[in-house]
Image: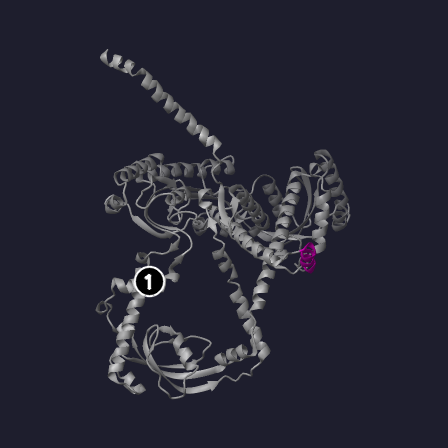
């Protein structure tokens, strides 16, 4: 009661406190509503941002282009990531060039674009479907016809597959047209830079002399390897001085992370393997019987290889099945057996074998009308007309088709998913007799088919394959998950994780210079969330458990250090600098020994302790010389050879592999005649390659920010 009375006495104060808390809660939500929405930008170029929505639209556009041009219906994660990177690269390059072109007044007019299309030689145009069937060259008339047809197209009256194809082709062409403009603008800007780098007669003569003037030289050297590294002292002040001198080499334009991580892959336990083996024994027994429908049966087993009722060549079968095919007769069953290559348990039944033509020539007329009844009536009419002697090609032309024969082989359909109308279509072609005609009903259309030729007979088979991956069970995954979770909870710092990972049966891995533009960690699929965390975490932090891979991997990440944008810290480049300092100090020591030896002739240098000698022939200024005795490329040998006097000994020269002296003993010119025009053309090509670096320079000036990892 005393406590209750005490609370009552504080009633007004509690009302104020609770009121303030409620106000803070409500005000906090109100502030979230009133404040501007958080940035949804994926990047920035020259201060101009691109939103996640716009970037996604560009990715989807390019994805459809790739699907259309490649004939693929779906893309792998790796292909999708490549598309995302390519879209970003194109976007950045176009923005960089657009800004410079605008300052210079460079544009691409509609007339220029039309001239490119009329010429028809641009590489992009060769990638379009608008190509002459005979020559393979771009056909502008075919493009014009398509654009006219598209503009008049009534999608509502067309079969959906045709309407979708026309729409995809139009989007594809729109992308090509836009890309042609962007490419032409970049070409014009690059040409402007290239033309500013012109050659002259003096440069042409120097380039010619540098290529045709050859020298044969004697070389005596003391390799750096003759001095043991431990005898050379490299101090912190040496490292600091070298770092300050070469600091610009260590410029880093984006932030990176150095991480440590553990990647756990869950595998099947002995109990899991035994359970799958038992299932496969049951399936093998059923396979040895006569299932009513092999397609349905194989699907019910969970096999990764579907059964299609077609004859296939042996090479289209899984390699382990093809290797055992001769070990079983028709109607026989082989298995179950374990295949280590793909970690599967397998059984198969050889249903049939035959020697059949692999290449079949056929021609066809596609028939589509307003509805199914009219389509059937028209198809019957065409079929009967051809059967009664009408010319196939002439009838085809009457309905806007060529009716030309085309070839199909097993390579065109083996490995593809075949069912429904596709299976019906291929089965018909592969089973028709030569010159036989048929009227095939397929969905909303009919196809008049005739086989006109057959060749290239091959052994083919019908094989029902049950291929089951040896996968882990839910219980096995749960145990691995719990064990890993407990390890992470008990080792929530980098120090603990590093100290205890090995004892717990885990391997701690290192990844230096992780970029946010990467698509994951450690080459494991599905680790984008872990990547995002790594770039939001502070140094020393350890993540939670991430489930990734093909639902068979687990990951934990720790941020060892952050390398900010700017100059890489001295600690990260010490090893590189130490190597260079060691080489320089060894060179100083060797040169001091040479000076103390008072050597004045090549023989004296050659006879010094630890010296090696060599003869380097056909040395020109145009190419760095390789010295076998030092096992290094030595540009200074080429530089000295271009100005050295015959039989005159050089002073000691500090090279890449050691300190050496040179003495030319022969000089000659290649039997070539100087041609100023030819040399200047070669130099112009070199200048053009140098001009290609302009994009890198523009990129560095543009302060490009890539934040795609936050969204994609």
Say if 226 sits above or below 560 in the image. below
Residue visible at 27% across and 81% down in the picture: 594
Quadrant hosting residue 637 = bottom left
Quadrant position of residue 189: bottom right
Residue 460, percent from left and from top: 53, 50
Magenta-drawn stretch contains 418: no
Residue 4 on image: x %, y %: 26, 13
Which residue is tagged 1? 243
Residue 230 visible, this angle: yes
Residue in the foreground of this view, choosing between 565 and 35: 35
Considering the whole magenta stretch, tell me its main secondary structure.
Answer: helix
Question: The N terminus lies in which quarter of the figure?
Answer: top left
**Which residue is rendered at x = 56% and y = 51% of the image?**
410
Q: Secondary structure at mark 1?
A: helix
* x and y, in percent, of residue 546 in the image: 36, 40
Q: For this rendering, which residue is in front, 367 or 352?
A: 367
Residue that lies at the very extreme toward the left in this rendered image: 231
Q: Which residues are magenta?
A: 109-119
């Amino acid at each position: 009661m005393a406590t209750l009375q005490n609370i009552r006495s504080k009633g007004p104060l509690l009302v104020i406190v609770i009121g303030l808390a409620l106000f803070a809660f409500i005000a906090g939500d109100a502030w979230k509503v009133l404040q501007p929405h958080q940035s949804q930008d994926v990047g920035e170029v020259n201060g101009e941002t691109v939103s996640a929505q716009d970037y996604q639209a560009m990715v989807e556009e390019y994805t459809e282009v790739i699907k259309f041009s490649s004939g693929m219906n779906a893309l792998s994660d790796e292909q999708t990531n490549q598309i995302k990177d390519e879209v970003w690269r194109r976007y950045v390059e176009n923005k960089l060039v657009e800004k410079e072109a605008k300052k210079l007044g460079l544009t691409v007019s509609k007339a220029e674009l039309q001239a490119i299309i009329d010429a028809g030689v641009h590489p992009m145009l060769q990638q379009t479907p608008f190509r002459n069937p005979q020559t393979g060259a771009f056909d502008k008339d075919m493009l014009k016809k398509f654009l006219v047809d598209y503009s008049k197209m009534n999608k509502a009256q067309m079969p959906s597959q045709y309407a979708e194809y026309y729409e995809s082709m139009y989007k594809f062409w729109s992308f090509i047209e836009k890309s042609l403009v962007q490419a032409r603008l970049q070409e014009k800007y690059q040409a402007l830079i290239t033309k500013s780098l012109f050659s002259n007669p003096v440069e042409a003569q120097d380039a010619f002399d540098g290529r045709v003037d050859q020298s044969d030289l004697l070389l005596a050297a003391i390799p750096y390897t003759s001095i043991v590294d431990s005898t050379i002292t490299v101090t912190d002040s040496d490292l600091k001085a070298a770092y300050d001198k070469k600091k610009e080499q260590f410029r880093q334009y984006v932030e990176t992370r150095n991480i440590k991580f553990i990647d756990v892959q869950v595998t099947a336990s002995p109990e899991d393997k035994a359970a799958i083996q038992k299932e496969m024994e049951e399936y093998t027994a059923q396979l040895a019987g006569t299932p009513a429908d092999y397609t349905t049966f194989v699907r019910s087993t969970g096999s990764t290889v579907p059964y299609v009722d077609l004859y296939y060549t042996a090479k289209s079968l899984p390699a382990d099945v093809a290797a055992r095919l001769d070990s079983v007769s028709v109607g026989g069953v082989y298995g179950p057996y374990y295949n280590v290559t793909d970690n599967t348990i397998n059984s198969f039944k050889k249903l049939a074998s035959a020697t059949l033509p692999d290449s079949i020539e056929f021609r066809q007329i596609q028939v589509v009308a307003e509805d199914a009844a009219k389509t059937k009536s028209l198809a019957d009419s065409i079929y009967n007309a051809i059967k009664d002697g009408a010319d196939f090609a002439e009838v085809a032309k009457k309905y806007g088709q060529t009716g030309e024969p085309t070839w199909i082989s097993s390579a065109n359909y083996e490995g593809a998913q075949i069912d429904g109308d596709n299976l019906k279509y291929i089965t018909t072609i592969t089973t028709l007799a030569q010159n036989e005609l048929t009227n095939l009903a397929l969905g909303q259309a009919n196809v008049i088919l005739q086989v006109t030729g057959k060749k290239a007979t091959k052994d083919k088979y019908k094989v029902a394959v049950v291929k089951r991956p040896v996968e882990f069970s839910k219980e096995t995954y749960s145990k691995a998950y719990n064990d890993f979770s407990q390890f992470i909870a008990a080792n929530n710092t980098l120090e603990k994780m590093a100290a205890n990972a090995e004892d717990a049966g885990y391997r701690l891995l290192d990844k230096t210079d992780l970029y946010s533009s990467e698509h994951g960690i450690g080459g494991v699929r599905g680790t984008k969330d872990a990547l995002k965390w790594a770039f939001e975490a502070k140094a020393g932090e350890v993540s939670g458990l991430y489930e990734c891979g093909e639902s068979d991997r687990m990951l934990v990440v720790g941020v060892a250090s952050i390398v900010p944008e700017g100059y890489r810290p001295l600690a990260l480049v010490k090893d590189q600098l130490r190597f260079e300092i060691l080489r320089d100090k060894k060179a100083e020591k060797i040169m001091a020994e040479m000076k103390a030896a008072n050597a004045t002739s090549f023989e004296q240098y050659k006879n010094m302790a630890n010296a090696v000698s060599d003869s380097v022939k056909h040395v020109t200024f145009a190419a760095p010389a390789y010295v076998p005795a030092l096992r290094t490329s030595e540009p200074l040998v080429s530089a000295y050879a271009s100005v050295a006097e015959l039989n005159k000994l050089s002073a000691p020269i500090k090279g890449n592999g050691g300190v050496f002296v040179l003495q030319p003993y022969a000089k000659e010119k290649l039997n070539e005649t100087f041609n100023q025009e030819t040399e200047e053309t070669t130099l112009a090509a070199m200048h053009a390659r140098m001009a290609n670096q302009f994009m890198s320079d523009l990129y560095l000036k543009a302060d490009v920010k890539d934040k795609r990892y936050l969204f994609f």
